[in-house]
Amino acid sequence: MAAPDTSHGAGTAEYPYVIEMRHITKEFPGIIANDDITLQLKRGEIHALLGENGAGKSTLMSVLFGLYKQEKGDILKNGEVVEINDPNDANRLGIGMVHQHFKLVDVFSVLDNIILGVEPNVAGFLTKKKAREKVMHLSETYGLNVDPDALVEDITVGMQQRTEILKMLYRDNEVLIFDEPTAVLTPQEIDELMEIMRGLAKEGKSILFITHKLNEIMAVADRCTVLRKGKYIGTVDIKDTTKEELSSMMVGRDVKFVVDKDEADPKEVVLEVENLCVHSKLHKKDAVHNVSFKVRAGEIVCIAGIDGNGQTEFVHALTGLEPVRDGKILLAGEDVTHKSIRYRNTHGISHIPEDRHKHGLVLDYTLADNMVLQRYFEPRFQTAGFIKFDEVRRYSDELIEKFDVRSGQGSASIARGMSGGNQQKAIVAREMDREHKLLIAVQPARGLDVGAIENIHTQIIKSRDEGSAVLLVSLELDEVMNVSDRILVMYEGEIVGELDPKKTTVQELGLYMAGAKRDGKEEE
Amino acid sequence: MMFTTGTDKSIDRKTGLLKSPAGSALRSIIASVCCILGGMLVGTIILFILAFTTKDIPISDAVKGMTIIFGGPFASGSKSSTLFVLGDMILETTPLLMTGLSVAIAFKTGLFNIGAPGQYLMGAMGSLITALSVPTNGSNNFWVWLLALVVGIACGMIWGAIPGIFKALFNVNEVIVCIMCNWIAANVVSWVFSVSGDRFINYAETKTKFIRPTSTNGVSTPKLGLDKVFPGSNIDIGIFIAIIFAIGIYILINKTTLGYELKACGMNKHSAKYAGMNEKRNIILSMVIAGGLAAAGASLWYLNGKNDFLWNTYSSLPNDGFNGIPVALLASNNPIGVIFSATFLRYIGKGGFNLAGYTHFNEYVSNLIIAMIIYFAGFSKLISDLLGRRRKKKTIEAQSAAVIAENTEGGDDK
């Protein structure tokens, strides 16, 4: 994969690239984050920037946005070298960015957020009328469809994102950077976003789309630049490439998308849930209402659904983190509805939690200390109340080796300093290695790149094949379809359908998830 | 496969396992020393400014003043005086060390124990009442002393449990409850001694604001010959007991399953709960331990046998309770470090006391300088973090060497 041709002359109006980053090198003490990277963005194209976690995508964008200054290389706007020293420079050059975590003021209206920082005023008094007209006009042109007077805290994540897009358009930006924009969206919202992006490109905006989701690149991008470990790997035309090629460019080896697994061989019932109801903390209704189902040993049952439909509360009730209002939880025939968390942990439940920072790890503990989080009191790891640190270290080293958890200082690393993927791998290692009859995995692949996702899915299937029951809770349709043996769809706290992943389609699943379809009774 | 090369791991082990624990301890020590030096520097500047702006104070006093403060008990130059002051300094270090430990263990478990003054008062009350009530034959009575110590600690534990229970069960911020408990303790103690009348108040020496010293009932902390080493001072073995407590807490925090749980709850109560730990019990427990430690400080101080207790406490709280906070901060909450930071604060305290005697500065200035140094103690965490960041960079260098090695190998097999 040769370096791209950068020998064009500069300065003509027909210069094909609106932004060109030539041979950018950015070093941090001891590490080269960007090593001779070239990125050429054509006018009116959607250009994806693909790479694993830590490949240097964010650094490159920070250089473009003026947050870092490159050591070597030039940035060209319409063929002329420009200096970008801070985000204001970037703004002046028409470069705007939608960050992964939105930068909105929750208690302000959409309009107020859009004009924030460039408030139109006469002698210090706001004059919003013109601004409103401009926002409405933009909103219509690009089909963004937001209510300018709604408070940000009241609107959906998708609408918040559209507010961010409007912010860029309001400032007349012509280069739009989207930093992992789909991570927070539902499948339907993702489709809408794709449509918006296409519309923007058609109107002549140039889009840089940072992601590690290959499907989205294939769906929407024109070209794609791949980075790996700080190096430039290549730029490809999407119409000439495949998902497989992109992923092997990104990871440096071939990645399997369809997880290899044998037919499930369900045996005895491990988990039985009867009419489970859980109170909601947000409203007066139940967060989980009247849920009943069984999970057998040797099968993977997936709870699919859009975020916020009661999955979190349901899992918390199963694992004991939240009390049950009504109903029963039977683990291998034993009623554990009101047992302690410790009891459930030691009687066969392993739990890969949804929020690895909040629940999964004590971030300021070492990796070794985290590896024994539910086991430190076992005779193997303590005598008379004194922890056997040698044994803890030995066990932790063993898990690190077995599950390929990578960190700066092995067992002695502080968990906080590890990459997200490796933190997750550490949790998976810990939960897999504990003796369990039931594995509850909540969004185990969240925020991970394809290589790590493959690894984690393999582990989950291995756990199934070794005879445990697996309950997978996922928002990702690919994951739901690929990994599970049986799908239960959760909508507004209830199970609305049971599907066989081999017989159903993503579209059908989507209908169930959106509440448009349900088993048993028709919509009233 | 390029992902499982052995090189990075061997390098990681070398940098990680050998350097990490010792490195962080060293960092804390360097940070504390930096704070002390910073405080000294600013203190000296203040002395110079005062000397320049005040007519009565010669410039030479500014230099002299600093040497006196840092000379501590040695400032007088005479041997007998030095030994006497040194002995008292060690005696006075004991309660400060204990309240420092109390604050430090609470910090370690994510709680801010600003209730040490109240726990201290309850401990003092428990110990004094026990030591003066149990009938003795008048000569030194070790078992009564021990009982009084235990009762004092128990009183502090109960007092510490209150904010712990409020925090654990009702999620009330411990700082608020602690502050209220301080004043409740001050009034409870005043009330108890005011209604108990002549049984405890020191009428014999007509010091009616004070409780009788425990030596009047033949109860006092053993001295084991220390009074011969430091003639003239009231020193007793309390300091050794305090050091044993410090070592015990160090072991508890760092070596035991209980310490592992307490720290986990302090750092992240959600994951502690997820792991099946009883986070409510642990919050209460660490406040109980903290309360017991603060109370032990008071017990050891008043069971010395010579120290007067001002029972009319409702209008003020004991300083040693609050001073536990800078002691803990200066020690980065390390129980062993608390031994040194408490000693250091007492040391410059003695120096500050001498400042007014040997120079033209008055005692307010010495308090100001000491406050300055304590204030700088608050920066120890900041400096420790800054040092940590520099160390991290070095680790990253080692790591990136490993990554580069991995990359080259990866390039080959591709």
Image: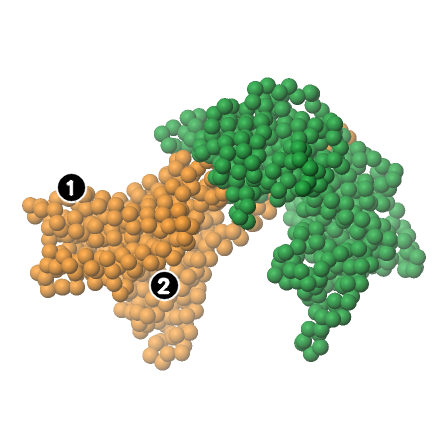
Chain colours: A green, B orange
Q: Is residue B3 left or right of residue B345?
A: right
In-image side of B200 versus A142 (left or right): left
Q: Quadrant of residue A389?
A: top left
Q: Is residue B193 above or below residue A127?
A: above
Q: Residue at x 30, y 43 (%)?
A: B245
Type of residue at label 2? Answer: Ile
Near-viewer residue (A491 or B341): A491
Give the CA distance from mark 1 to mark 2: 39 Å
Residue beneath label 2, please? B370
Picture coordinates of residue B257, whole percent (x, y): 40, 35
Quick one: label 2, few (<14), some, or many (20+) residues within 10 Å?
Answer: many
Q: Nearer the viewer, mark 1 or mark 2?
A: 1
Q: Label 1, on which residue?
A: B143
Q: Nearer the viewer, residue B295 or B164?
A: B164
First along the sequence among labels 1 and 2: 1
Label 1: chain?
B
